[in-house]
Amino acid sequence: MIKEVFFKVAENEVERFTDNLMDLGALSVSIECIEGAEIIKDEQSFTNEYWDLNKVGALIRAEDEEKFKHLEPFHNEEVAEKDWVLEVQKNTPIQVIGDTLWIVPSWHKVPKEAKEVLLLDPKNAFGTGDHPTTHLCLDWLVKNPPREKTVIDYGCGSGILMIAAKKLGAK
């Protein structure tokens, strides 16, 4: 079972505190503005503003909860078990790039009107073609088909750009 625990943390302690949570075995950490926090403007800061008080959340295994007690969480709750792959699948639609390229996740039926089809099995993070820069590159490839050209996909994802380039005529 997974639990989420929350802590109130001052801005100047956030980085050290979140590192400590990870060292103790947190599965992930998140930082949000806590209700009532003051927003501080800082032109020298990367984000130009930050909060004086933060709500730091950590996902932990229930069996590890004792390790975190000394940090005095102000709230904790159980996280419902989910099949995250199924959750991602429910929210991954067919994409049409231009009027030519159709990115169809493997659990969808390929529409009859689809022209060039990339039948993919995307997972939790990569492979959907939905990231804005990937989508921009796919759109460019559709508008400028790389027929008989050599193309390099210099990314770190699923290779969707290379697959699309090949479908659109690349060597």
Image: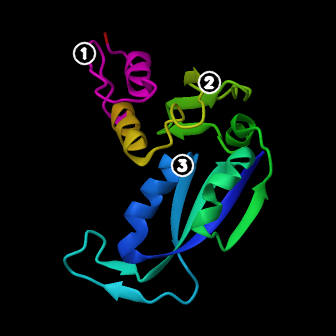
Q: Which label sits in the foreground, 2 or 3?
A: 3
- Amino acid beneath label 3: Leu
Label 2 to label 3: alpha-carbon separation? 35 Å
Q: Which label sits in the foreground, 2 or 1?
A: 2
Residue at the spot of label 3: 24
Quadrant of the image containing the N terminus? top right
> Crowding at label 3, few (<14), some or many (≥20) Cα neighbours within 10 Å?
some
Residue 121: which disc? Answer: 2
Q: Residue furthest left?
A: 44
Residue at the spot of label 1: 149
- Amino acid beneath label 1: Lys
Depicted 159 relative to depicted 14: above or below: above
Q: Secondary structure at mark 2?
A: loop
Rendering quarter of residue 140: top left
Residue at 37% across, 44% down? 133
> Crowding at label 1, few (<14), some or many (≥20) Cα neighbours within 10 Å?
few
**Magenta span covers which residues?**
143-170
Magenta part, dominant SS: loop
